Amino acid sequence: MGLEEQLPSGFLLSTVEGLAGYLRKSSLWPATFGLACCAIEMMATGGGRFDIARFGMEAFRASPRQADLMIVAGRVSQKMAPVLRQVYDQMTEPKWVLAMGVCASSGGMFNNYAVVQGVDHVVPVDIYLPGCPPRPEMLLNAILKLHEKIQEMPLGVNREEAIRAAEAAALASTPTIQLKGLLR
């Protein structure tokens, strides 16, 4: 007769994946990639009014080797795309990407040859944050949604399968440049 059978379900017991997910989500270290006006709002979340430190993210990392979350804030030019990919490749595993603002998500109002039409053409994106520019409260909400996603992510072989399935779904989706909207 084990301890699990005598205690109510879930009382002081957890899985290794649950514990690892909790520890991962509670210790995200963001790498800033501020490229435009969205970067001002991202910097405001580090201030005392919004206080991103309560989520364990007070230290924005300048080195990609110390970071596991990339917040891409603003429009990405064609010249900056290889640099963005290089920074992403240098980040430690597991790593996540948050596309902050409409320019990072879909190119925004810059529908021309110089701006990448969505950062998802360069790196895989986990969370899209709309807005022009999005408020710091919206960034905090997106971080909480990312925490939920990290908490539920499996470990080991199951994690690799989940990543492969997510990449396959992303490749099968219609690119943002081919979507028909109000202006096309």
Image (spheres, rainbow, N blue to C red):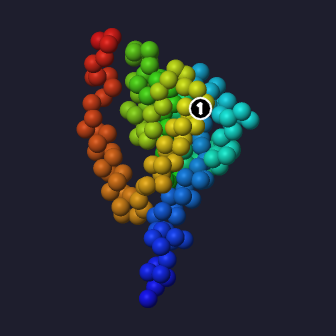
Residue appearing at x 46%, y 85% in the figure? 2
Point out residue 139 in the picture as x, y percentages from the top left corner.
56, 34
- Image point 33% across, 26% down: which residue? 176
Q: Position of residue 180 (x, y in %)?
A: 27, 18
Residue 155 lies, in percent from the top left, at: 42, 62
Q: Is residue 160 above or below residue 170?
A: below
Please name whichever residue, 110 or 2, is drawn nearer the observer in this view of the structure.
Answer: 2
The answer to whether residue 22 shows anywhere in this view is: yes
| Residue corresponding to mark 1 | 137
Q: Is residue 57 above or below residue 114?
A: below
Q: Amino acid at mark 1?
A: Glu
Q: Residues within 10 Å of mark 1 (few under 14, many from 20)?
A: some
120 and 80: which is toward the camera: 120
Any part of residue 36 in sight = no
Against 113, residue 170 (above or below) is: below
Judging depth in this view, the residue of 139 and 91 nearest the camera is 139
Taking the view exactly as shown, the residue that stands out farthest to the top is 183
Residue 40 spot, x, y in % from top left: 64, 25
Q: Residue 175: which quarter of the image?
A: top left
Q: Which is more toward the observer, 166 or 18? A: 18
At x 59% / y 32%, what residue is drawn? 137
The mark total stands at 1
